[in-house]
Amino acid sequence: MRSVVLTVVLLASAMLAALVAAYAWMQQPPAMFLQRSPPSYWYGVGMHGGMMGGCPCTGGYGGPAPPSGQRISMQQAVEIFERYVTGLGQGFKLKEVMEFQRNFYAIVVETDTGIGAFELLVNPYTGAVYPEPGPNMMWNTKYGMHQGMMGPYIQPTADMPITPEQAEEIALNYLRNIFRGAVEVEHPTKFYGYYTMDYKLDGNMHGMLSVNGFTGQVWYHGWHGQFIQETEMEEE
């Protein structure tokens, strides 16, 4: 019995250590990501599966998936996202899709409130759908990992002390300390616990970042690669 308990404790400790390490890695400043060469693999999972622990996960992350074959088109990516969102049932809709060098990115909002629910990625070669890392999983107080898998650490709410305008200003100040040139921040999308916004550098779309709606902490999305194009869904 003692050996079983010890094994469980060791496994739990290892999982916690891995989570902390992943969180620390993704908190590195964007300079780290900009200096790194593009990764030789993409993480992905199957396109089917339901909600797991409140997070729009699809069975967990898969292993390395080297880019091979033909890259899927924007239209194909939109169709993949739409099928996935439809599979979650009523209550969600696709807001926008962006194509980057390393993945396709989508914002999913609640149909009744218009508030951002979660963010998804699609592997540009396999079409696999998986939840975006970072704020989507760690700061999302309604659909993220903390709410569903680790117990609620804060009451899910989109009423945050930091306003969208303040989040824009925080993001702008952060980016001006990182990049040279003219930086312009787009209007943020409000999620439960944070804001995500795109930004332009010297007039061209360049990337995105998130601002915690309670602490003002900034999380730069350094896993996308170069921006290619975007499309917004028509309002119903």
Image: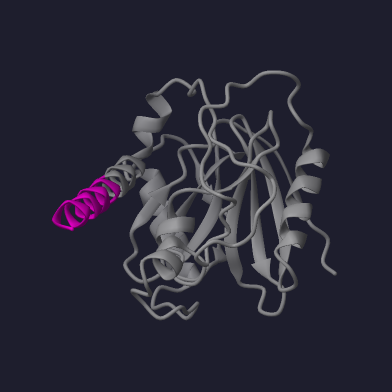
Answer whether residue 209 is visible to the viewer in this image. Answer: yes
Q: Quick check: is 7 in the magenta stretch? A: yes
Residue at 41% from the left image edge and 34% from the top image edge: 180
Q: Position of residue 78 (x, y in %)?
A: 78, 46
- In magenta, the rendered stretch is 1-17
Residue closer to the observer: 9 or 202: 9
Query: Residue 94 falls in which quadrant of the image?
Result: bottom right
Residue name at image x 65 percent, y 42 percent: 46
142, above or below 96, in the image: below
The overriding secondary structure of the stretch rendered in magenta is: helix
As drawn, the residue found furthest toward the front would be: 1
Q: Position of residue 208 (x, y in %)?
A: 52, 47
Number of numbered discs overlaid on the protein picture: 0
Q: As drawn, is 184 to the left or to the right of 37? A: right
Horizontal and vertical percent position of residue 163:
45, 74
Judge whether 72 appears above or below 68 on screen. Answer: below
The quadrant the N terminus occupies is bottom left
Where residue 101 sits, quadrant-wise, is: top right
Answer whether residue 13 is magenta in the image: yes
Q: Nearer the viewer, residue 3 or 25?
A: 3
Residue 55 higher or lower than 129, as above or below: below
Q: Is residue 187 visible?
A: no
Q: How is the image coloured?
A: one colour
Give the residue drawn at x 76%, y 46%: 80
Residue 129 in the image, given as x and y percentages of width and height: 64, 45
Image quadrant in which the C terminus is located: bottom right
Q: Nearer the viewer, residue 28 or 2?
A: 2
Does 69 sit above or below residue 54? above
